[in-house]
Image (tube, grey):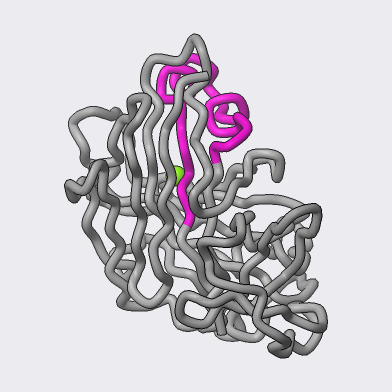
Amino acid sequence: MNIVRYGRGDVVAYGILDGDTVYEASGDPYTGGPTRGTAVGPLSDVTLHAPVQPSKIIAIGLNYQDHIDEDAFDFERPENPIVFLKPPSSLVGHGASIVLPAGTEKVDSEAELGVVIGRRCRNVKGSDYQDVILGLTNSNDVSARDYQFKDGQWARAKGFDTFSPVGPAIVTETDPTNRAITCRLNGEVRQQSNTDMLIFDVPTLIEFVSRVMTLEPGDIIMTGTPAGPPTMSPGDVVEIEIDGLGELRNTAVAE
Ligand code: MG
């Protein structure tokens, strides 16, 4: 099932996407799952919002070796997952603009597997990770590199409004392994890897993060990006595609 949040007129609601058609969804996606209602209309008739409404966006830094090894950065392989937070106010959905803030000079797009938490949990054993996941989605950990390295911590660099595109849907599958992950800039492939290349895999991340903080339904873990995150200029179109999760497309615009 593909769970979306759509907007049409003044209404914003959860829906179910099947092919190119959005259907109404009755019931809470986090308590037993929604059931499909009547058709709302084709995708082209609605605005897609981020499909999650998290209490927090958890992101993981430096989780692909080829990204750590890039000449452009001075990174070292971490001994444990590097966890940081992004504000929910940075979320946007498929089709939305990514606003390049005035004053920034290098804003990169980072293709990442997004793991959506399905129920409140704490101290989850890695082997039980599938019990707490609602589904998977494409995500983009947009990053202002100049601020990231200048500030020493990443809240500003990764926290601007529109810096967390997610979607188009939560796909209710719980197996994150062996999924090709691709980022295209204006149609050209710039990142190409596979979720099996994660240094810390999803079970490890769920166990590690849930030992620190209670995870709530709708919280999302962005699991890190592979090598080659492209720098965006106004007008650039970024597409992130992970096997089985559809395609997340956004356009960069100047502030
Ligand atoms: Mg990232």
Q: In this view, does 151 lie to the left or right of 175?
A: right
Residue beneath the point at 34% across and 51% down: 239
Q: Is residue 219 left or right of residue 78?
A: right
Task: Establish if 183 lies above or below 181.
Answer: above
Image quadrant occupied by the N terminus: bottom right
Residue beneath the point at 52% across and 82% down: 18
Q: In this view, does 168 lie to the left or right of 176?
A: right
Name the spot of residue 7 as percent of width and height, x first: 69, 57
Name the spot of residue 39 as percent of width and height, x first: 65, 81
Of 147 and 49, nearer the camera is 49
Of 101 and 152, nearer the camera is 101
Residue beneath the point at 53% across and 26% down: 157
Q: In which quarter of the image is ligand 1?
A: top left
Name the spot of residue 22 as percent of width and height, x first: 60, 75
Question: Which stretch is magenta?
Answer: 139-163
Residue 178 colored in magenta in the image: no
Visible in this render: residue 218?
yes
Task: Establish if 71 lies above or below 25.
Answer: above
Name the spot of residue 115 as percent of width and height, x first: 55, 67
Visible in this render: residue 204?
no
Residue beneath the point at 35% across and 67% down: 242
Number of disc labels: 0
Task: Establish if 27 lies above or below 117.
Answer: below
